[in-house]
Image (cartoon, helix red, strand yellow):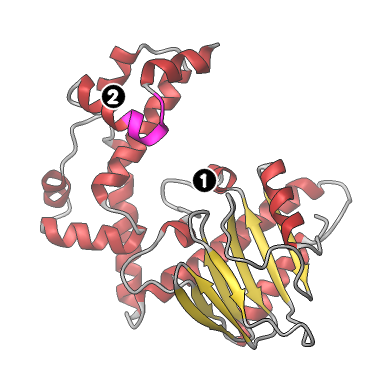
Amino acid sequence: MKVLTSYSDGIDHCMASRYFSIAHLHKESGILSMHSHQCYEFYFSISGGRTFLIDEKNYRIEPGNLFMINQHEKHQVLQMDTSAPHERYAVFIDPGYLKSISTPLTDLTYCFTHRPEKFSHRIALNQSQQRRLTYYINKLSTEGGFGQDVEERSAFAEFMVFITKMTIDASLGDATKDQRQYFNSKVADIITYIHHNIDSPLSIGEIAAHFYLSSSYLCRLFKKGTGTTINSYITTRRIELAQTLLSGGYSVNEVYSMCGFNDYSNFFKAFTKKTGISPKKYAQNSLS
């Protein structure tokens, strides 16, 4: 992949390709004012001495800081001193592409969707983590050669797994290794159970009973692990399944019960809210 040298070019390339792009920046170029864009963004600082404002949170930028910004969060680098270079990498990622390479057990969008209380957009990487992140960026910067496209996608998936693991570890704070393993395993088991039973009328009480947990603990565990509530997650998965079925030619009346909704009214409201279009219109557009 060609590494760009302009922030705005990085955004434009990501949006046009529906993929990802990398920009290696040494000076301010393009967007400096408060802004947002339709890409996920990693901002890896090589040098410091600046302040990052992200959704009204101020962060002092230090060398080795990694920032994670989603498409809804407005951000701006402040206190720019044009006489001093500010070297950093910006990696822009299309949300749809990142979702497409995730799995039910490995949600690679976690860095951008996990926004619990006391969330920090910044992770201070140690020297080992900085070297590994730089290794992945260099690997992704390779251009040309047979199989380069396959290697690039593979390297990017590894890159995202590496960063997602760091983000999860940071969110767990001072938990012990055994606690982290239990936490990650339990959340993965809950997600798997939801996916296997998405066509059933799932409830928090039923899921909690299946895992011998209290309903309140289940909700806290799931929210901490995914950044979203369990009800919201179930609804999102049901709507995604409904979109697939509607695109496959199933009728609206068939689909709502196949996705675990107990009546058409609830299905219609949830689908329209999530997609901005009615189920019938979505089906017509998909098959036209």
Q: In the image, which residues are magenta?
A: 271-277
In the picture as drawn, the residue positioned furthest to the front comes out as 33
Dots 1, 2 in contact, CB < 8 A: no
Quadrant in the picture for residue 222: bottom left
Amino acid type indicated by mark 2: Phe
Q: Is residue 259 above or below residue 66?
A: above
Amino acid type indicated by mark 1: Lys
Mark nearer the N terminus (1 vs 2) = 1
Quadrant in the picture for residue 33: bottom right
Question: What label sits on residue 99 in the rendered view?
Answer: 1
Identify the element where label 1 is drawn: helix
Q: Residue at x 35, y 38 (%)?
A: 237
Neighbor class of circle 1 (other Cα within 10 Å; few <14, some 14-19, many 20+) is few
In the picture as drawn, the residue positioned furthest to the right comes out as 145
- Image quadrant holding the N terminus, namely bottom right
| Residue 11 placement (x, y as % from top left) | 69, 54
Q: Residue at x 72, y 72 (%)?
A: 135
Neighbor class of circle 2 (other Cα within 10 Å; few <14, some 14-19, many 20+) is some
Q: Which residue is mark 2?
A: 268
Identify the element where label 2 is drawn: helix
Q: Nearer the viewer, residue 32 or 239?
A: 32
Q: Is residue 61 above or below residue 141?
A: below
